[in-house]
Amino acid sequence: DNDGEGDIDTDFLSSIEICLVLHSDVLLMQNWDHVNDSMELMNHLPKKNNDTDFSRVRNYLLAGHGVHWRQLIVCSTFLDPLITSTFERHSKCIAGKFKIRRRTLQQDDEE
């Protein structure tokens, strides 16, 4: 969402390989759309050259497959449908995806 500010340079997001979203429950209370917008902008091919040494760039990034190699890690203290949908929509890693939930003392007592 540019809101008339002109083109925003997002080329620096093109080669993200590990995306770690810590305290996503806190971000959810602020403005979750910013997280979704940032995820949408990641791993697109750069629009400008910026004097890049392409011999140092991984071939799969240049081929536009960076989104399939990016690891997305989302940490939260509780499960929320918005967090889950963002994870499901933007986690396209070819290695797969999984969710881990820590057991609480209350859950241990119930068993």
Image (cartoon, rainbow, N blue to C red):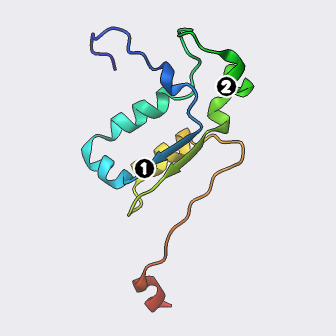
Quadrant in which residue 6 is drawn: top left
Residue bearing the label numbered 2: 61
In the rendered view, tell whether residue 51 sits above or below residue 32: above
Q: Position of residue 28 (x, y in %)?
A: 32, 48
Q: Are marks 1 and 2 in contact (CB under 8 Å)?
A: no
Residue placed most toward the observer, 29 or 80: 29
Q: Earlier in the sequence, mark 1 or mark 2?
A: 2
Q: Amino acid at mark 2?
A: Leu
Residue 104: x percent and y percent? Answer: 43, 79
Q: Position of residue 58 (x, y in %)?
A: 70, 27
The kind of residue tagged 1 is Ile
Of 18 and 110, the residue lying toward us: 18
Residue lying at 74% horizontally and 24% vertically, measured from the top left: 59
Is 69 placed left or right of 12 in the picture? Answer: right
Find numbered disc 2 in the image and state the secondary structure of the residue it sits on. helix
| Element under disc 1 | helix
Residue 83 marker: 1
Answer yes or no: is residue 63 visible: no
**Left or right, 12 with reference to 24:** right
Mark 1 packing: few (<14 Cα in 10 Å), some, or many (20+)? many
Judged left or right of residue 103, residue 59 is right
Residue sitting at x 34%, y 34%: 34
Where is residue 108 drawn, in percent x and y? Answer: 47, 87
> From mark 1 to mark 2, how far is it between C-alphas?
26 Å
Marks counted in the figure total 2
